[in-house]
């Protein structure tokens, strides 16, 4: 059930937008792009990959299991995985000064919590190498693998690879890189990207002559991060001289660099900020997309969304930018189009902050805009709702009906083949509701002109979508109610069972944390509007995971529910993970011991001070194993 090559190609060529992918397709695309990258044959630029993976996917599905793992490196190696001497986390990324300043705000907040003056926060900036990550413990060299286990690639050192600046072995994390000037002079004719060459150094087969020579010439090197030249200074300087610092650091080394890594120097502050599963919070990589182009707008086409919102899409003069030809970009909404003068013949400045979302930065030469009077799908007059141009013919507008049905299967995300093309064909045969689709059989589909094999496949996919378990909130979100995305649906179903939500009144919804009164009103109306279709679909017996039940079971079997717990010392799991898990099952986690604390959970190397505090306040002390057995 791999993502079809066709979709991958179309994405790379930007013939379809990332919005048009289902969550599942998006995940699959990330996996494919990742594999291709690791094999040294990237299909998209790093910026695009980072964007689609870290921005688009995170935005769409922040809880996707992909984020629990660090993008695996060195998948091309089949050898057995060995435990890394220490976990190698990824680096969080920022693409704008805005994001960097948010990071600075977070570190200032943490500094205040430990009483560190803001003028005492020290920052170090180093070039972010675009090489092959490894960890050198002095004995062996490991690939980063999944961040916890990697492959043993010590053979690279046996082949004569030197450490940068002739330093000794054992300096920890770093990257295998090739000098840029050397690559351009000797290798560029045989390798498309330095990464392909870097990968060839590590391969199990004997090295070819070129690779051996690069090692002897000390052009191919292992660069431990601690060896990198750096800018260092106080946080105030970073704020005032950001652009200068970036410019300075980017050219510090003769290696491929794809950004600048900022990190906190103060040890206490680093400890205070800690890490999540993927990143150290005291570190961030700034990556900039410098590629821009001035592009002429050929026309602006209105597209109708499932809610009736009309989105302007700018058709552009085909332009090569960051390695792909761009032909379209979204104008977001007609209010903006009007304000910016995004009309036929206008000239825009374009960048590619993402693979399939070319971004219009500004309109350089405005032209009169063409605001459509009628819906391009149903031809009914359009109306303005604040900045948005809307088709309010919600019941009969083909684009909206098709959009809603497509959305259902996209959000459910446990089916294939029920994309927009299939739904359009069903629409042409008078199908208007998802429940009507579930009532179809193979014969019906064949009468509509689907082939026998396709019909069978579609029925299989419909059956699969019913039998494969999905969360009840995902099922509810698939109905596409206003203000009822995945997050709000989950929040609602953490408090009420799916069958009960249709009887809720305004007050009951407002009482749930996170729902303001206006949202609650919209939810009540939305539920009334979907009730009939919900009941028809519900009867098909979807295999739904009951969120509230799962939550109740966890709290019922957990004697620490609602108790205040402090964790300290080195645990077998990362302390952050333990805290997160504890919170998820209703334990109140805090960092300091007080009279209100119920339990102190201790790992190895716990400071005496904490235990004395616990005794002072009469807090029960337990070891990690006891804690784990209680939950
Ligand atoms: Zn319409």
Image (cartoon, rainbow, N blue to C red):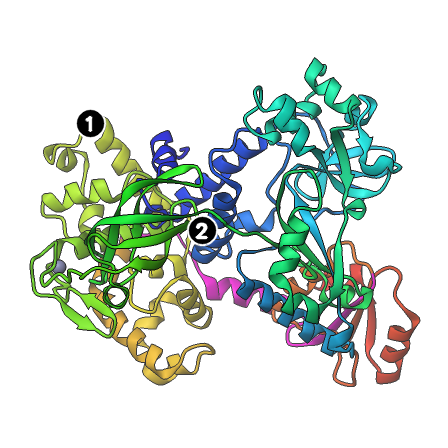
x, y percent for residue 259 = 61, 49
Marks 1/2: CA distance?
A: 43 Å
Viewer-closest of 508 and 158: 158
x, y percent for residue 423 = 20, 44
Q: Helix, strand or loop at disc 1?
A: helix
Span colored in magenta: 540-569
Viewer-closest of 414 and 252: 252
Q: Residue at x 15, y 41 (%)?
A: 425
Q: Residue at x 77, y 78 (%)?
A: 117
Magenta-colored stretch includes residue 563: yes
Label of residue 452 in the image: 1
* Sequence-first tag of 1 and 2: 2
The answer to whether any part of residue 77 appears in the image is no
Tally of numbered discs: 2
Label of residue 353 in the image: 2
On screen, residue 64 above or below 120: above
Q: Residue at x 29, y 38 (%)?
A: 417
Q: Ligand 1 quadrant? A: bottom left
Count neighbours of disc 1 (C-alpha within 10 A) and say few if under 14, some if 14 to 19, many if 20 or more: some
On screen, residue 217 above or below 533: above
The answer to whether any part of residue 418 appears in the image is yes
Picture quadrant of residue 8: top left
Split into 4 quadrants, where in the image is the N terminus?
top left
On screen, residue 440 above or below 93: above
Count neighbours of disc 2 (C-alpha within 10 A) and say few if under 14, some if 14 to 19, many if 20 or more: many
């Amino acid at each position: 059930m791999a993502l079809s090559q066709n979709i991958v190609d179309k994405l790379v060529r930007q013939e379809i937008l990332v919005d048009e992918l289902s969550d599942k397709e998006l995940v699959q695309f990330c996996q494919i792009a990742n594999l291709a990258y690791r094999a040294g044959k990237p299909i998209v630029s790093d910026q695009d990959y980072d964007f689609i993976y870290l921005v688009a996917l995170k935005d769409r599905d922040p809880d996707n299991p992909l984020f629990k793992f660090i993008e695996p490196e060195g998948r091309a190696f089949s050898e057995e995985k060995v435990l890394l001497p220490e976990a190698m986390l990824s680096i969080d990324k920022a693409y704008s000064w805005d994001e960097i300043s948010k990071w600075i705000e977070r570190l200032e907040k943490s500094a205040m919590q430990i009483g560190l003056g803001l003028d005492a926060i020290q920052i170090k900036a180093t070039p972010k190498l675009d090489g092959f990550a490894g960890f050198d413990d002095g004995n062996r060299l490991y690939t980063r693998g999944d961040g916890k286990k990697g492959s043993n690639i010590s053979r690279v050192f046996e082949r004569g690879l030197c450490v940068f600046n002739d330093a000794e072995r054992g300096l920890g994390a770093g990257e295998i890189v090739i000098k840029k000037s050397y690559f351009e002079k000797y290798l560029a004719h045989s390798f498309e990207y330095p990464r392909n060459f870097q990968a060839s150094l590590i391969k199990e087969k004997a090295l070819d002559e070129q690779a051996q020579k690069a090692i002897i010439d000390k052009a191919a090197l292992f660069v431990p991060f601690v060896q990198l030249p750096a800018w260092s200074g106080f946080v105030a300087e970073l704020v005032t001289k950001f652009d200068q610092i970036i410019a300075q650091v980017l050219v510090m080394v003769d290696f491929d660099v794809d950004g600048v890594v900022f990190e906190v120097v103060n040890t206490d502050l680093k400890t205070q900020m800690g890490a999540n599963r993927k990143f150290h919070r005291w570190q961030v990589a700034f990556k900039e997309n410098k590629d821009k182009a001035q592009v002429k707008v050929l026309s602006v086409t209105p597209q109708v969304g499932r809610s009736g919102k009309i989105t302007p899409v700018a058709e552009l003069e085909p332009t090569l930018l960051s390695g792909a030809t761009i032909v379209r970009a979204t104008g977001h909404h007609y209010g903006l189009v009007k304000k910016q003068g995004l009309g036929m013949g206008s000239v825009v400045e374009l960048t590619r902050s993402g693979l399939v979302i070319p971004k219009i930065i500004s309109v350089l030469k405005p032209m009169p805009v063409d605001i459509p009077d009628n819906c391009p799908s149903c031809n009914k007059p359009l109306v303005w709702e604040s900045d948005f141009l809307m088709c309010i013919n919600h019941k009969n507008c083909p684009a909206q009906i098709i959009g809603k049905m497509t959305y259902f299967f996209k959000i459910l995300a446990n089916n294939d083949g029920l994309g927009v093309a299939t739904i359009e064909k069903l629409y042409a045969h008078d199908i208007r509701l998802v429940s009507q689709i579930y009532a179809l059989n193979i014969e019906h589909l064949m009468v509509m002109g689907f082939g026998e094999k396709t019909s069978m496949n579609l029925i299989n996919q419909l059956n699969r979508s019913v039998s494969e378990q999905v969360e009840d909130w995902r099922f509810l979100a698939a109905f596409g109610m206003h203000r009822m995305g995945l997050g709000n649906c989950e929040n609602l179903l953490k408090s009420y069972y799916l069958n009960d939500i249709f009887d809720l009144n305004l007050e009951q919804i407002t009482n749930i944390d996170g729902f303001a009164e206006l949202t609650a009103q919209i939810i009540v109306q939305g539920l009334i509007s979907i009730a009939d279709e919900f009941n028809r679909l519900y009867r098909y017996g979807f295999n739904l995971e009951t969120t509230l039940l799962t939550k109740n079971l966890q709290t019922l079997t957990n004697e620490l529910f609602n108790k205040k717990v402090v964790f300290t010392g080195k645990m077998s799991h990362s302390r952050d993970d333990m805290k997160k898990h504890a919170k998820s099952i209703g334990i109140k986690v805090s960092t300091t011991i007080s009279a209100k604390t119920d339990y102190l959970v201790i790992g190895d190397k716990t400071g005496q001070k904490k235990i004395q505090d616990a005794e002072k306040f009469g807090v029960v002390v337990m070891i990690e194993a006891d804690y784990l057995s209680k939950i």
